[in-house]
Image (tube, rainbow, N blue to C red):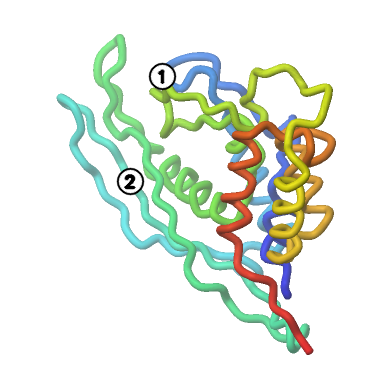
Amino acid sequence: MSDNLQIWTKVREVPRSAVKPITGGRLKGMSDINPVWRLKTLTEQFGPCGFGWKYEIVEKRLEHGCGDEIAAFVDIVLYVKVVDESDPGHFSWSEPIPGTGGSMFVAKEKSGLHTSDECFKMALTDAISVACKALGVGADVYWDKDKTKYDNSRQDKDDIGPETKAKPETKPVLSPDKVQRLESLRKQKGITEEQHQQALKFYKVASVEYLSEKNYQHYIKHLEAQPLQEVTA
């Protein structure tokens, strides 16, 4: 079975130098990923732009918002080159990966209305980031923070993974039956030991026995959603 997380695993981590905390405004407390890092990551994985990856602008539009404000939106589709597993020397383009980005064209500020002549460029950058997210680019930032600009008003904080505020367990929590069920399901779904250890790292435990009940249920649901491992004769 091919590793469905092969690309995701390679592009999920973001170096600290490419992450900048947002310290003001409506998005205060969130993180901003340097867009050039995304382009560099695409190039590292697939080749130069236009040769190993490319995008097409599907639509650019302006829409009126509150009062006199006007927002700019760009819709794109991203393509990456895929290696033919049966013939490593043969490549083909992936199916289109959609992304929609937005930025303000006319924004209301303290000094009055401000018009941006870079709104479509910024919306395009945003659209590329959205498409890249589907490939797992920068996934650790979104997963670890569990908070994005689309989630500014979130109130309910489930104690799953790094968000948990509970003290680390000093003795096993799960019953042997639950441990066996998880391990069996993991192997049935073809989750490698490396992927399993990454999951445990996310939940901040050294082994399955120390998972909280909520994290255990979260992990089980994640495994159940994975396709069955192909068995070859």
Most foreground residue, 232 or 120: 232
Residue in the image at 69% along x and 78% along y: 230
Q: Quadrant of residue 171?
A: top right
Q: In the image shown, does 203 or 67 lie closer to the viewer?
A: 203
Helix, strand or loop at mark 1:
loop
Q: Quadrant of the C terminus?
A: bottom right
Callout in the foreground (1, 2)? 1
Q: Tell me where residue 90 appears, x and y as whole percent.
A: 71, 86
Query: Residue drawn 65% across and 40% down?
Result: 216
Numbered label attached to residue 209: none
Q: Nearer the viewer, residue 78 or 214?
A: 214
> Which residue corresponds to the image point at 62% horizontal and 49% vertical from the top-left?
220
Q: What is the secondary structure assignment of the residue under circle 2?
A: strand
Task: Specify the label residue 73 is tagged with.
Answer: 2
Tell me if 54 is positioned left or right of 2 in this view. left
Image quarter (top left, top right, bottom left or bottom right) of the N terminus: bottom right
Amino acid found under the numbered disc labelled 1:
Arg
Which residue sits at x=36%, y=50%?
A: 74
Name the kind of residue labelled 2 in the image: Phe
- Against 27, is 193 above or below? below
Query: Between residues 206 and 19, which one lies in front from this camera angle?
Result: 206
Q: Position of residue 219 (x, y in %)?
A: 64, 45
On the image, numbered disc 1 is attached to which residue? 26
